[in-house]
């Protein structure tokens, strides 16, 4: 062990690096929320064509110490074969002899060639394990931590950095008895006596799953004067525990910048832990360098390279340009002059002049796609705005920009903007008016004022307390009003407080929320065709129809009789209910309906009964039969309706008018009358129905004896 300690001294540079990340590694081991809190070992698996390699790590010091003492046993359970479940799972003990770390003397050959092995061996077997690097602040803090925590953390870290150390530490096993198409559960346990609880961990694996290492993504480089800060996304399925940085001067031949990898010491999750960082010193300022990143897995595999990020360093300037003069030339152009030390010209690519109409507005480049030459100290803006904020940017050869303070120049403006155009509006059912218009083309527009009136002929009043900057305006209006429309105008104002004329008037139709006035009923009349209803029109101008409702007197259910179009200018309105039954009394009401579908209150109720005065078809006579011997005549007739109450038989002789002769019940269709031989008589019949209605009187039937 004495020789091993001597070798460890040669690993001081590596020990410094490991000590610097010590506290972060501890925090990582104790705060990984993505693992099963119920298991004491973290286990991962790496499938190959003919084998499966397992790696595991204890989650706490006690489990690590017990693993070092007892070793580990590994069980494999066959869960499925060719997508068919195996029940119960087939159990195989893969380690009849437990997997254990190497004993002290067996580490010495590995320690001679592997610095990580030297540190791990010192952590496992050393009498004391402290890091004393001149008692610098960070190492003083580390030395105050518990010794066992140091041993635990450093040993696992070195196992992650070197597969040989992981194997020597008893944290590695390869299963060569796997079969394609099978799904396994591996269980790793500390080989404690069966009477005691065994710490364990597990992992599932399908031998058909493809194993592919991801490409590090999102790499960026921030190139400063002599350094570069690299950043990349490490949220790639947690495959990698360390990274190597490669640099190239020609973009073709890449070499590692250090033999010590960049270690991911913060857990995944959250924006602050998403990225990995690394820095490098640029060998030559002004030379372009290319960087890329590769990941290293706990199995010692190096993944594919990321995309390349390129850049170069540049000399930092101590001071930027300063604008000392801005002159308005005849209110048509502006001359800008600035100061900049000529000794720094050799570090520049040139100057860029920018302009905006507001200090925090969007700046426009005035000097084109290429910077002005480094000797130039003046620029003339031939198309200035009314309000101008200028700044000059000194652009270094490395692309870094040094901005001057802002310089303000204003032209004289007496021309008002044009009146806004393209007004349109939308009104919601709740009464929110959203007014919008086309933006004015003038570049110095300060804002807009909105004016409103209830009628086009009245004076408009301002609805905006102050100019609005947007080309839209919102306000809520009262819909429970008799006004059917609102009227709007808009005015534009520029930065010089020049006011445009008012825009053209926009009429905005309001949603109708006021129900119409009810109509006024007139008395009901009985007509030959039915019950005649009449009413005075509603006083509301937007009524489009009337709904006629009725019910039986004493009833509760209203029925719709008809809907009457109100478009015709008729007053009063008349309607005949032809469906009214004769002799029945009805109650009627009316509802006025406006353009918005709103209904009025009910009109006052009226009632009426229809008496059927409509004359029905007359009786048709059959041929009479005269019995001279009996001095009788048999009269008969034909009538199809069954609701006959009675027949009224009229009789006349000679030229005399007919008089009522007999009243016959409705079920009779014949009558026998006595006669006088040698005379003549004319008969007529009138039908009376059960509802009181009557038929027309029949034609006369002349009978001669």
Image (spheres, rainbow, N blue to C red):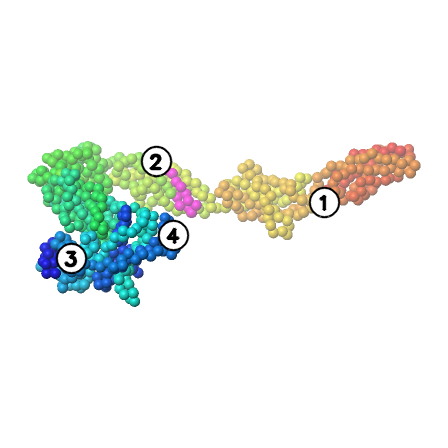
- Specify start and end residues of the magenta stretch as a single range: 422-433
Pointer 4 residue: 85
Q: What element carries label 2?
A: loop
Q: Where is residue 461 in the image (x, y as percent from the top left)?
A: 36, 43
| Mark 3 vs mark 2, CA separation in Å | 87 Å
Q: Is residue 665 magenta?
A: no
Q: Position of residue 125 (x, y in %)?
A: 16, 62
Looking at the image, is 559 positioned above or below residue 76? Answer: above
Q: Is mark 3 on a helix, strand or loop?
A: helix
Looking at the image, is 197 positioned above or below residue 83? Answer: below
The residue sitting at 15% across, 45% down in the picture is 256
Circle nearer the N terminus (1, 3): 3
| Mark 1 vs mark 2, CA separation in Å | 73 Å
The residue sitting at 28% across, 62% down in the picture is 199
| Mark 1 vs mark 4, CA separation in Å | 88 Å
Circle nearer the N terminus (1, 2): 2
Circle nearer the N terminus (1, 4): 4
- Residue closest to the eye, 451 or 340: 340
Pointer 2 residue: 421
Instruction: Report the side of 145 relative to 72 (left or right).
Output: left
Q: Label 4 neighbourhood size at 10 Å, few (<14), some (14-19), many (20+)?
A: few
Label drawn at residue 691: 1
Q: Where is residue 84 in the image (x, y as percent from the top left)?
A: 38, 50
């Amino acid at each position: 062990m004495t020789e091993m300690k001597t070798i460890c001294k040669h690993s001081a540079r590596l020990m410094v690096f490991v000590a610097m990340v010590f506290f972060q590694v501890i925090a990582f081991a104790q705060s990984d929320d993505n693992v099963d809190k119920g298991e004491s070992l973290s286990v991962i698996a790496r499938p190959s064509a003919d084998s499966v390699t397992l790696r595991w790590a204890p989650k706490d010091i006690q489990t690590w110490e017990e693993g070092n003492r007892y070793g580990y046993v590994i069980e494999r359970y066959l869960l499925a074969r060719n997508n068919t479940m195996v029940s119960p799972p087939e159990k195989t003990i893969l380690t009849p002899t437990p997997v254990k770390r190497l004993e002290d003397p067996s580490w010495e050959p590995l320690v001679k060639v592997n610095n990580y092995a030297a540190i791990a061996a010192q952590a496992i077997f050393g009498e004391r394990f402290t890091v004393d690097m001149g008692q610098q602040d960070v190492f003083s803090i580390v030395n105050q931590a518990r010794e066992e925590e140091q041993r635990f953390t450093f040993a696992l870290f070195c196992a992650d950095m070197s597969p040989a150390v992981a194997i020597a530490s008893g944290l590695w096993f390869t299963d060569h008895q796997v079969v394609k198409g099978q799904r396994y559960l591996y269980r790793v346990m500390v080989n404690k006596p069966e009477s005691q609880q065994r710490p364990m961990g597990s992992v599932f694996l399908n031998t058909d799953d493809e194993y592919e290492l991801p490409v590090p993504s999102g790499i960026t480089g921030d190139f400063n004067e002599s350094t570069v800060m690299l950043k990349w996304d490490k949220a790639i399925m947690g495959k990698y525990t360390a990274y190597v940085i490669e640099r190239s001067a020609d973009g073709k031949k890449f070499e590692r910048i250090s033999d010590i990898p960049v270690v991911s010491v913060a857990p995944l999750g959250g924006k602050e832990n998403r990225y990995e960082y690394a820095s490098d010193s640029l060998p030559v300022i002004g030379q372009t360098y290319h960087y890329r990143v590769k990941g290293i897995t706990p199995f010692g595999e190096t993944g594919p390279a990321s995309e390349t990020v390129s850049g170069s360093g540049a000399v930092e300037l101590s001071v930027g340009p300063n604008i000392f003069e801005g002159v308005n030339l005849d209110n048509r152009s502006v001359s800008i002059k600035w100061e900049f030390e000529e000794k720094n010209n050799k570090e520049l690519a040139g100057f860029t002049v920018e302009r905006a109409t507001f200090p925090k507005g969007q700046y426009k480049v005035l000097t084109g796609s290429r910077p002005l030459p480094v000797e130039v100290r003046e620029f003339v803006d031939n198309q200035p705005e009314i309000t101008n904020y200028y700044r000059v940017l000194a652009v270094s050869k490395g692309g870094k920009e040094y901005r001057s303070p802002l310089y303000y120049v204003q032209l004289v403006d007496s021309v008002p903007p044009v009146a806004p155009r393209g007004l349109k509006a939308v009104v919601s059912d709740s009464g929110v008016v959203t007014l919008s218009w086309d933006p004015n083309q003038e570049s110095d527009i300060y804002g807009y004022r909105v004016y409103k009136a209830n009628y086009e002929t009245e004076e408009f009043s301002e609805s905006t307390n102050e100019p609005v900057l947007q080309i839209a305006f919102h306000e809520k209006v009262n819909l429970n009003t008799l006004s059917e429309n609102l009227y709007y105008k808009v005015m534009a104002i520029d930065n010089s407080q020049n006011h445009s004329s008012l825009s053209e008037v926009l009429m905005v139709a309001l949603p109708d929320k006021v129900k119409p006035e009810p109509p006024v009923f007139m008395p009901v009349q009985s007509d030959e065709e039915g019950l005649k209803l009449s009413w005075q029109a509603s006083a509301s101008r937007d009524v489009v129809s009337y709904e006629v409702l009725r019910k039986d007197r004493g009833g509760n259910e209203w029925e719709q009789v008809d809907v009457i179009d109100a478009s015709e200018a008729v007053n009063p309105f008349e309607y005949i209910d032809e469906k009214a039954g004769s002799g029945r009394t009805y109650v009627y009401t009316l509802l006025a309906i406006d353009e918005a579908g709103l209904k009025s209150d009910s009109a006052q109720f009226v009632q009426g009964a229809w008496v059927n005065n409509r004359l029905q078809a007359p009786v048709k006579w059959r041929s009479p039969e005269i019995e001279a011997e009996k001095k009788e005549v048999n009269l008969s007739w034909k009538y199809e309706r069954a609701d006959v109450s009675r027949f009224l038989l009229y009789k006349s002789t000679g030229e005399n008018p007919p008089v009522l002769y007999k009243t016959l019940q409705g079920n009779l269709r014949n009558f026998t009358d006595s006669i006088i031989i040698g005379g003549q008589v004319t008969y007529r019949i009138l039908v009376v129905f059960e509802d009181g209605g009557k038929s027309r009187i029949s034609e006369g039937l002349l009978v001669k004896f």
